[in-house]
Image (cartoon, rainbow, N blue to C red):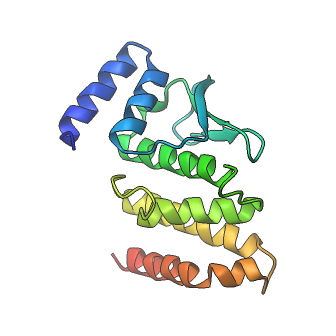
């Protein structure tokens, strides 16, 4: 693995040259986020510090594209890496092999991944503040699933893990 200082330096270089898409491709490779169902990146308007949005677009079962803000790499690298991993998990979820149809299930899985990095173990941990925010989003999507449904039961243990992490983070 490349040293974090070198990764940050490389990303800053890409950003200074306006090579956001190239930076994203490079990070996908370095952090082993590749998915065969991924098509390409597309840029959107610049993001504001209070609202950074990446989206995965495409019909389930077909190739997916990820839209990211033109200034994506002006934000903290660990946050952007986690957001890229979140979207790459959506790419996988929308593949022919995985096909996770329910949006609430997809989002719960992706926020869970941002907290525990089981699918993408090279992704660094978020700040405590961001972990709390992502943990609360995971619980929000869990609660949007039909109460007592099979899908809620399927993720009950993971929900408990998220709740325990949120308690731990609150104590810190």
The residue located at (42%, 44%) in the rendering is: 81
Residue 101 percent location from the top left of the image:
77, 59
For the C terminus, which image quadrant? Answer: bottom left
Quarter of the image where one finds residue 75: top left
Near-viewer residue (87 or 16)? 87
The residue located at (49%, 26%) in the rendering is: 71
Q: Residue furthest front?
A: 97
For the N terminus, which image quadrant? Answer: top left
Residue 60 to residue 134: above or below: above
Residue 38 percent location from the top left of the image:
59, 37
Left or right of residue 150, residue 79 in this image: left
Residue 33 to residue 163: above or below: above
Residue 136 to residue 127: above or below: below
Residue 165 percent location from the top left of the image:
44, 77
Left or right of residue 83, residue 42 in this image: right
Near-viewer residue (50 or 26)? 26
């Amino acid at each position: 693995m490349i040293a974090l200082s070198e990764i940050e330096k490389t990303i800053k270089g890409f950003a200074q040259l306006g090579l956001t898409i190239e930076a994203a491709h490079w990070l996908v490779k370095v952090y082993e986020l590749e998915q065969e169902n991924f098509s390409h990146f597309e840029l959107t308007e610049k993001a504001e510090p209070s609202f950074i949005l990446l989206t995965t677009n495409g019909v389930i079962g077909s190739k997916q594209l990820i839209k990211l803000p033109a200034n994506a790499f002006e934000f903290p690298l660990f946050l952007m890496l986690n957001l890229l991993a979140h979207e790459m998990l959506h790419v996988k979820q929308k593949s022919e092999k995985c096909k996770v149809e329910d949006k609430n299930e997809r989002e719960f899985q992706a926020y869970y991944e941002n907290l525990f990095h089981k699918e993408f173990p090279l992704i660094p941990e978020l700040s405590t503040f961001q972990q709390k925010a992502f943990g609360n989003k995971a619980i929000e999507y869990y609660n949007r699933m039909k109460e007592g449904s099979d899908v809620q039961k399927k993720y009950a243990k993971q929900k408990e893990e998220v709740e325990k992490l949120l308690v731990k983070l609150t104590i810190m």
